[in-house]
Image: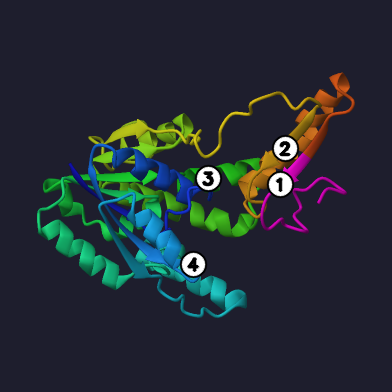
Amino acid sequence: MKILMISSTFPYPPTGGGTQVRTFNLLQYLSQRHSITVATQGSAEVTAAEIAALGQVVDELKVFPRPGTEAIPGGVWGKVSRFGQFLTAGTPPSVLSIYSPEMQQWINQQVQSGTYSAITCEHSVNEIYVHPQWQQQLKTVVNIHSSVYGTCQQQLVTGTAEKPWRDRLNLPLLYRYEQRYCSKFNRIVATTEDDRVQLQALTGTHSPTHAPANPQAQIQVIPNGVDLQTFPYRSGDPGGHRLIFVGAMDNLPNVDAARFLTLEVLPAIQEKYPDATLALVGLAPLQRCKLWPSGLE
């Protein structure tokens, strides 16, 4: 089967995180039995060596320049402008800001050629490139790495939202946006069972207050995994009671998890193992995040 994968995030190297590593592991697995073409975007951080290495994994690699984001006024006016854009366009500014007309034109040509049996969007941000009528020509798949509506809702419920007032305004718009783009696909992939339930409520008949957007869509859960060749099991027990939490520390869900681990889990462990220690390891720590326990950096 010939598969066209769309990933605005350049899916390499495999030691990256989030969208990058999930997409790479998936395309590497699929390439064992299928012909994979990847349409992606480059940036100043993507090297020629990384492009060459990814090209060895897939049958065809098409790299487009990432669009430059237009300056949006700051302050109150900037916030109003972004919200107004979301309200009228129905698509989050974060999606529109990296949309490439050149990439869209190339994808349109590939679909019209009839070469591919399936087209997949790696992360929902890429849904913008898929037209609803393509469902009649080939399998259309969106791999939703995380539900934008579900994530926003959870952060509001748990008090981990960075800007609660903004997220409360955006929440119904995110519901409408996710429901709309899910209707364009005949296959939906979720990362967790919780996301599957959330997406089923959006697309199926499980929502008591909203009409179903795509009741025929099939939702499959493909959890994140670990490449044991790149990250093998330890050959022996190093001893001790040292814990390490690894994650990007400018990501609020990670901050919330680290806070829970520090405040709730670690004290219980230290009751049994007083010498237990915890190290938080990750890029870009938020220095003044209200979620951090007092004295923790």
Judged from the image, the secondary structure of the residue bearing numbered disc 1 is strand
Please tell me which residue is depicted at 52% across the width and 40% down the height of the picture: 230
Q: Is residue 133 left or right of residue 154?
A: left
Please tell me which residue is depicted at 56% across the width and 71% down the height of the picture: 79
Mark 4 or mark 1, which is nearer the start of the sequence? 4
Please tell me which residue is depicted at 85% across the width and 19% down the height of the picture: 272
| Quadrant in the rendering for residue 107 | bottom left
Residue, disc 1: 281
Judged from the image, the secondary structure of the residue bearing numbered disc 3 is helix
Q: Which mark is residue 83?
A: 4
How far apart, in angstroms, are the residues tagged by discs 2 and 4?
A: 39 Å
Front disc: 2 or 4: 2
Amino acid carrying label 1: it is Val
How far apart, in angstroms, are the residues tagged by discs 1 and 2?
A: 7 Å
How far apart, in angstroms, are the residues tagged by discs 1 and 4?
A: 34 Å
Q: Which residues are magenta?
A: 279-297
Mark 3 or mark 1, which is nearer the start of the sequence? 3
Front disc: 1 or 3: 1
Front disc: 2 or 3: 2
Please tell me which residue is depicted at 51% across the width and 78% down the height of the picture: 72
Judged from the image, the secondary structure of the residue bearing numbered disc 2 is strand
Q: Which mark is residue 244?
A: 2
Front disc: 1 or 4: 1
- Where is residue 271? Give x, y as percent: 87, 22
